[in-house]
Image (cartoon, helix red, strand yellow):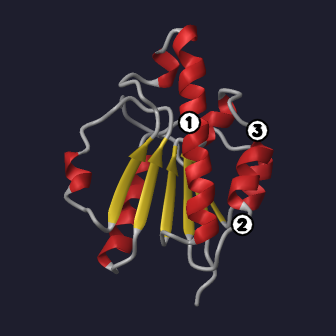
Amino acid sequence: MEKSTIRAYYGTGAGKSSAALGYALRSASEGRLVYIIQFMKAEMNEEYLKKLEPEVKLFRFERTKDSFRDLPADKRDEEIQNMKNGLNFARKAISTGECDMLILDEVLGLIDEGIITDGELASVLSPTVLHTDIILTGTFITPAIAEKADYVYRITEEKGDN
């Protein structure tokens, strides 16, 4: 069996989540089970992902429909706990090997916002089983997380007005 890999897509350009979803589609087409856990994003139309079930399953632990960054301070504490619940779910999925690929979409933003430390994320990634590939996305990556990853891709925009 092949060794699992950790890939990180980070940067200010668009396409990090799309790149991760490309891997999800490839894995699903091979009959592999993919979990996607979203962090810090506004609720989106998930109908197209539901068509990919049961091979691709989307999880979102935040309760608000708004982006975390747009929330008033009093609502952030509750959402922080919800995001930490999502991270604990990720830890369980990794340690039990219940999925073949785990995408932690915008998880690097939890470090940016001071919700978790890079050491806490590294701890979640540590108990990887032999067949769980992991993809991390976000705007910034710390040296500790970059060191933990097998592949690191920086996505920037060279031209355009997004």
Cα gap from disc 3 to disc 1, whole angstroms:
13 Å
* Vertical position of residue 74 compared to residue 121: above or below: above
Q: Is residue 141 rendered to the left or right of residue 75?
A: right
Pair 3/1: label in front: 1
Q: Which mark is residue 83?
A: 1
Residue identifier under label 3: 117
- Residue type of the residue flagged with mark 1: Met
Which residue occupies 56% across, 51% down?
Answer: 89
Q: Is residue 115 rendered to the left or right of residue 44?
A: right
The front one of 130 and 81 is 81
Residue 127 placement: quadrant? bottom right
- Residue type of the residue flagged with mark 2: Pro
Cα gap from disc 2 to disc 1, whole angstroms:
20 Å
Which residue occupies 46% across, 32% down?
Answer: 62
Q: Earlier in the sequence, mark 2 or mark 1?
A: 1
Q: Residue 5 at x, y = what percent?
A: 61, 71
Pointer 2 local density, CA inside 10 Å: few below 14, some 14–19, many at least 20: some
Q: Which mark is residue 141?
A: none
- Residue type of the residue flagged with mark 3: Thr
Q: Earlier in the sequence, mark 3 or mark 2?
A: 3
Cα gap from disc 3 to disc 2, whole angstroms:
17 Å
Q: Residue 4 at x, y = what percent?
A: 61, 75
